[in-house]
Image (spheres, coloured by chain):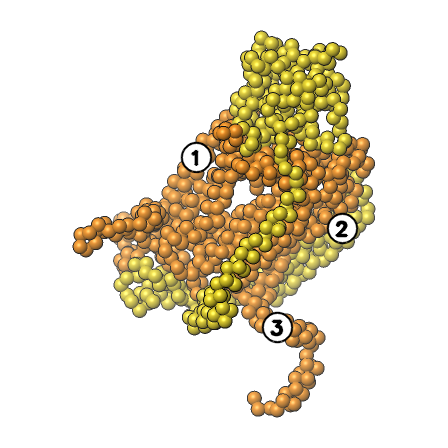
């Protein structure tokens, strides 16, 4: 460009005069925020499409719904345990002494128009948020989307799940009804069981003895400020990383580990994802319109000397609840001190260890494979039978404990003895995950065999052909190139070997015991019985070189 | 890359990830035709775009346009309906809606109209995207997440330079005192937490019961006489003078709540339990020793009492021994007798702490 500075300025000025208003606003913003640079990288960003990628979106959108409705609720809720006599419009409770928290929850439900709807959207939204996070996490787990470079995003998502559980707990404790107060009682008892510092922790958290007058204002601060603040930051980080690392995709025609195939953010993905937010919000609204959730007015205000039956936490905490219910009573008294094993084992050992194992899984698997490459093509769950079996074993274990967490409901509805159900869960706790692991692995191997068969012999067409010499055969149609690629284009890991026990001089080689664990895990994952070898190019050519013989 | 080597595709070497499907590899009608000789499972590349009916038939596109517009219009009407419902329905009007049953008219109408308004926008946008917007699949290359080696070298070099210029490593005294200051600073925050609550002291060991405290019916507030408790019944009691709504009531009742049962003295198996009873009336703490719920489900034939929270089951005829469930020790018993006016009274506080176990309980 050889035009002089003054000319250029003139040209720019005249250009700007002609530019439409939208562009001029964008120019103004770009001069201050450099928005064109950001838009260049994101506006036409490609997102691959698959129904299972929606699950994370459901979680994201229900989180937004919860924040919107939660802000509304804070304007009417009074986080106070001061006792008042109720004089609102709900007749059965008039004259009853209750905390201001409970009274203001009744006001939201009966005196604020639309308050009940927003309360119900908030609570349903929370249940859906947690459920969506769970299934999204399963999708990521079973397809191996947590592999490099996404291990950290798995950890962020995992942290969101745990924080979501505790935000839920602090939220449903706020109305101070008989059920939520019982939940607080549980929390108090659990904290008391902490070795050495339990009584101090309980006194400090509750501001004195149970129930005191501090816990609801404090939980209110955790529930509306501290926890959602951290979660919001994590959600932004999580989604930013998805943008930055680009989304994973399933194998298919044109889709490789080095590209991403799909539709651009503007317009298609914006319309689909933006529209999907309204769909999620709409569905939650319709549920909140028709299905009552947590009718605190039928339960009554909390009193520490009373309890309601069917005292369960919200579903996402059913798993620690189940652990507590099936644990046999066990206290160890030593030197004037008590170890409350019946609470320490379920809540301070099993619960955190299981959660920790979930968080650490991507690192464990990459240690076993030793694979340092990036993975952007998703696994078909059958192609990693051991991982899939671990995942299913965990899910089955989770459901067994959910039964344990609601053992009184099962006993009531199925007319069974609560002791039998508890014993069923105690045994199932050990047996069901092992059985599920074995069954899942066998199903995966069977599916791998079927894939192999299909690749080598083609699809059964259902057409029976009679050959000249009288033999009947079924015609098998060869697969398309895309199908061949999807079924056999993936790679298979080979199991690690320890190597010879002695080196070339006959000296016994020392093998690190950690290395031995790694090798045996690797054999379990990828050795014989861990996977079916996929068809090789030679096998394929040999079988398909002359058509017709089978 | 395996495409130039023939014979060993079956060996899963480190670089056998498929690398087909670049835009230049796209040809209309591409299928199994472009099968590379070397790899029968090679990626065939992105297939040609399949036209939708809306792409070729303007009438179909018009129909889609009308559908989307109709959904957006439905949303507008629903928002008007939302405002109308807000104004029209009183908060306490109950209506019967199948299958939900008797529910609030206001809640139902607001929720449904809001839901329809949202679903209209959502369904309209998605239908628009699916039928009218260009649906050609595009390909974008991924960039490497890790930095290029030159960038890495430059960053490390600059960091080293910065570190050297700071003299952080050379002036140990500065470094170590900074560590010390930073390590001590958070203690201020920890100290501030001290006033969150009082120290435990013996608070968990004491309740409102003491010698001579009369047992009062929890529901009626009347003093209890032995004849009020019939064989097989379960009654709840509190110490006299502890009234609902008074300051500190909740904390006291959370420890003092009492459960009274009457069992034929011959059926009481535990010797001390019998001694602490009065004519077969046994007073046990109502607070479960597992995690602190109020124990309340009594089975009079077996003298078993069950906690509804985690199903710990206690045998009240045998010193409230734990029969089943996660509780770790029996419910504490309160020693009772009758005062000179014939009312039941406590002979002192509980001999052991009530409620869930804790480290100092011993």
Residue lying at 64% horizontally and 24% vertically, measured from the top left: B286
Q: Which chain is rendered yellow in the image?
A: B
Q: Which chain is rendered orange in the image?
A: A
For marks 2 and 3, give the CA distance: 41 Å
| Residue where numbered disc 1 is placed | A430
> Which chain is mark 2 on?
B
Residue lying at 39% horizontally and 46% vertically, measured from the top left: A386
Q: Position of residue B190 (x, y in %)?
A: 60, 48
Q: Look at the picture and state if A8 lies above or below B298.
A: below
Q: Nearer the viewer, residue B222 or A90?
A: B222
Q: Look at the picture and state if B176 lies above or below B214.
A: below
| Residue where numbered disc 3 is placed | A34
Of all residues, the one furthest to the top in this rendering is B266
Q: Position of residue A292 (x, y in %)?
A: 68, 39
Q: Position of residue B149 (x, y in %)?
A: 42, 70
Q: Are marks 3 and 1 in contact (CB under 8 Å)?
A: no
For marks 2 and 1, give the CA distance: 52 Å
Q: Position of residue A93 (x, y in %)?
A: 77, 33
Secondary structure, mark 3, is loop
| Residue where numbered disc 2 is placed | B82
Q: Nearer the viewer, residue A174 or A340?
A: A340
Label disc, if present, on residue B108 of the rendered structure: none
Q: Nearer the viewer, residue A77 or B135?
A: A77
């Amino acid at each position: 460009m050889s035009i002089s500075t003054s000319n250029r300025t003139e040209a720019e000025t005249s250009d700007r005069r002609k530019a439409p208003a939208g562009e001029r606003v964008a120019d103004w913003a770009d001069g201050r925020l450099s928005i064109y640079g950001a838009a260049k990288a994101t506006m036409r960003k490609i997102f691959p499409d698959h129904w299972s990628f929606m699950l994370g979106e459901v979680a994201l959108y229900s989180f937004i719904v919860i924040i919107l409705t939660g802000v509304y609720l804070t304007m009417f809720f009074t986080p106070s345990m001061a006792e008042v006599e109720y004089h609102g419009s709900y007749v059965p409770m008039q004259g009853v002494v209750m905390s201001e928290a409970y009274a203001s929850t009744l006001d939201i439900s009966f005196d604020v128009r639309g308050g009940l709807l927003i309360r119900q959207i908030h609570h349903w939204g929370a249940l859906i948020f947690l459920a969506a996070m769970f299934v999204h996490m399963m999708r990521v787990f079973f397809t191996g989307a947590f592999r490099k470079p996404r291990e950290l995003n798995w950890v962020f998502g995992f942290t969101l799940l745990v924080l979501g559980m505790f935000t839920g707990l602090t939220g449903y404790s706020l109305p101070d009804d008989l059920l939520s107060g019982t939940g607080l009682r549980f929390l108090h008892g659990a904290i008391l069981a902490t070795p050495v510092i339990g009584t101090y922790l309980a006194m400090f958290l509750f501001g004195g003895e149970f129930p005191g007058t501090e816990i609801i204002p404090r939980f209110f601060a955790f529930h509306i400020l501290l926890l959602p603040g951290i979660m919001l930051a994590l959600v932004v980080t999580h989604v930013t990383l998805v943008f930055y690392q680009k989304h994973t995709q399933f194998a298919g025609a044109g889709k490789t580990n080095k590209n991403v195939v799909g539709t651009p953010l503007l317009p298609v993905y914006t319309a689909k994802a933006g529209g999907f937010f309204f769909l999620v919000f709409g569905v939650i609204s319709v549920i909140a319109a028709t299905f009552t959730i947590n009718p605190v007015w039928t339960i009554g205000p909390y009193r520490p000397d009373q309890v309601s039956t069917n005292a369960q936490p919200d579903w996402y905490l059913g798993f620690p609840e189940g652990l507590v219910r099936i644990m046999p009573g066990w206290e160890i008294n030593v030197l004037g001190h008590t170890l409350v094993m019946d609470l320490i084992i379920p809540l301070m050992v099993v619960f955190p260890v299981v959660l920790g194992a979930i968080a650490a899984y991507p690192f464990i698997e990459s240690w076993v494979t030793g694979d340092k490459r990036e993975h952007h093509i998703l696994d078909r769950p059958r192609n990693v039978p051991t991982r899939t079996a671990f995942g299913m074993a965990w899910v089955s274990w989770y459901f067994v404990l959910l039964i344990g967490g609601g053992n009184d409901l099962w006993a009531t509805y199925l007319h069974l003895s609560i002791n039998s159900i508890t014993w069923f869960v105690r045994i199932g706790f050990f047996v069901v995950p092992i059985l599920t692991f074995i069954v899942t692995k066998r199903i995966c191997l069977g599916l791998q065999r079927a894939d192999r068969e299909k690749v080598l012999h083609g699809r059964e067409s259902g057409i029976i052909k009679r050959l000249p010499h009288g033999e009947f055969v079924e015609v098998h149609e060869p697969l398309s190139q895309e199908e061949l690629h999807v079924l056999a284009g993936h790679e298979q890991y080979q199991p690690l070997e320890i190597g010879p026990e002695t080196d070339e001089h006959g000296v016994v080689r020392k093998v690190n015991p950690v290395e031995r664990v790694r090798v045996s895990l690797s054999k379990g994952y990828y050795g014989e019985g861990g996977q079916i070898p996929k068809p090789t190019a030679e096998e394929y050519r040999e079988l398909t070189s002359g058509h017709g013989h089978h | 890359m395996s495409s130039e080597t023939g014979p060993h595709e079956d060996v899963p070497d480190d670089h056998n990830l498929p690398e087909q499907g670049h835009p230049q590899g796209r040809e209309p009608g591409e299928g199994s035709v472009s099968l590379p000789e070397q790899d029968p499972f090679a990626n065939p590349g992105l297939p040609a775009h399949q036209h939708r009916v809306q792409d070729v038939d303007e009438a179909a596109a018009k129909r889609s346009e009308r559908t989307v517009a109709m959904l957006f219009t439905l949303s507008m009407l629903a928002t008007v309906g939302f405002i109308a419902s807000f104004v029209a329905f009183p908060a306490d009007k109950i209506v019967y809606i199948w299958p939900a049953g008797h529910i609030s008219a206001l809640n139902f109408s607001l929720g449904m109209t809001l839901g329809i308004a949202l679903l209209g926008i959502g369904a309209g946008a998605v239908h628009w995207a699916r039928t009218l917007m260009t649906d050609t699949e595009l390909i974008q290359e991924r960039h490497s997440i890790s930095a290029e080696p030159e960038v890495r070298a430059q960053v490390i070099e600059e960091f080293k330079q910065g570190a050297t210029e700071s003299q952080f490593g050379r002036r140990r005294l500065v470094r170590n005192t900074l560590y010390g200051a930073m390590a001590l600073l958070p203690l201020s925050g920890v100290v501030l937490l001290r006033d969150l609550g009082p120290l435990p002291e013996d608070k968990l060991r004491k309740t409102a019961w003491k010698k001579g405290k009369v047992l009062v019916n929890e529901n009626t507030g009347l003093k209890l006489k032995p004849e009020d408790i019939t064989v097989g019944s379960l009654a709840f009691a509190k110490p006299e003078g502890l009234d609902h709504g008074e300051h500190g009531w909740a904390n006291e009742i959370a420890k003092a709540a009492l459960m009274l049962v009457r069992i034929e003295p011959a059926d009481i198996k535990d010797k001390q339990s019998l001694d602490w009873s009065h004519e077969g009336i046994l007073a046990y703490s109502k607070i479960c020793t597992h995690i602190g719920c109020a124990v309340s489900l009594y089975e009079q034939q077996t003298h078993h009492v069950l906690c509804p929270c985690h199903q710990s089951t206690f045998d009240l005829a045998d010193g409230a021994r734990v029969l089943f469930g996660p509780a770790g020790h029996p419910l504490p018993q309160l020693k009772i007798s009758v005062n000179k006016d014939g009312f039941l009274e406590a002979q002192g506080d509980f001999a052991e702490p009530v409620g869930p176990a804790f480290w100092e309980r011993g």
